[in-house]
Image (cartoon, rainbow, N blue to C red):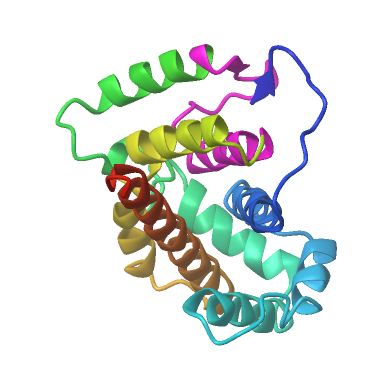
Amino acid sequence: MSESNATAAPLLEPEDEGRLQLYALLARLFAAGPDEQLLRALAQSAGTIEGDSELAQAWSELAAAAADTSAREETLEFDTTFVGVGKAPVSTYLSHYHPRPRKEAVLVELRDTLAQLGLARTAASAEPEDNLTAVLEVMRHLVAAGSDAQSLKRQQEFFARYLEPAYRGFSGAAHKANLGPFYAAAVHLLETFIESDLAQFEMDRSALSEPDH
């Protein structure tokens, strides 16, 4: 995805900076198999997310798995599982998991939403916009736009329309594919992080709906 009009990067709250980095990492992990540099960085990042939360545990699992594998091995698994020959064993197209009966309508609606946001698929990309990596990249872009109420509203709306209805279907399909430790941990981090964001969005909505006293 590319922006039609580039603007200066706004200041972000530390929490949003962390969310931006996680969206970017997950987008990279489900775009292609990792290279050795990424694996080394992940292996050295154990403990980056402090505490004993489920998100911290999921991160630690990914770091441990990264330390015990190779780029060649994980690229092979990625290509076998998420690319395949013909039809991939696990589709990375989120409209496939969307509960709406007309899946193609999801992609049409997504393209309209992206146009409204001033985003467009780059000429070099042949992937449809409902690819998991593309949707995660859009979330990264929306988080990067700022920590103000308007930015948060855009994040919530996009998340609720395109990520929330489909991510559990993708994660479930991936878990059934007998993934090795690295991509099993990547999928676990994906669903744990999205569930964390979902919980925060729901808390924010509840706070906004409460009457003032």
Q: Position of residue 129 (x, y in %)?
A: 49, 27
Query: Is 128 colored magenta in this rendering?
Result: yes
Q: Hey, which residue is sitting farthest bottom in the picture?
A: 52
- Residue 60 location, quadrant: bottom right
Q: Residue furthest front?
A: 213
Residue at 32% over, 59% down: 173
Image quadrant assignment for residue 12? top right
Residue, x 26% and y 39% (percent of image)? 98
Q: Is residue 185 left or right of residue 101?
A: right
Q: Nearer the viewer, residue 150 or 30?
A: 150
Farthest left residue in view = 101
| 61 left or right, relative to 170 | right
Q: Position of residue 166 (x, y in %)?
A: 32, 46
| Residue 102 vertical position relative to residue 168 in the rendered view, above or below | above
Locate the N terminus by quadrant.
Answer: top right
Residue 13 image point, x, y percent: 69, 51
**Front in this rendered view, residue 163 or 97:** 163
**Residue plotted at (60% across, 20% down):** 121
Work out whether 91 lies above or below 151: below
Q: Bounds of the magenta span?
A: 116-145
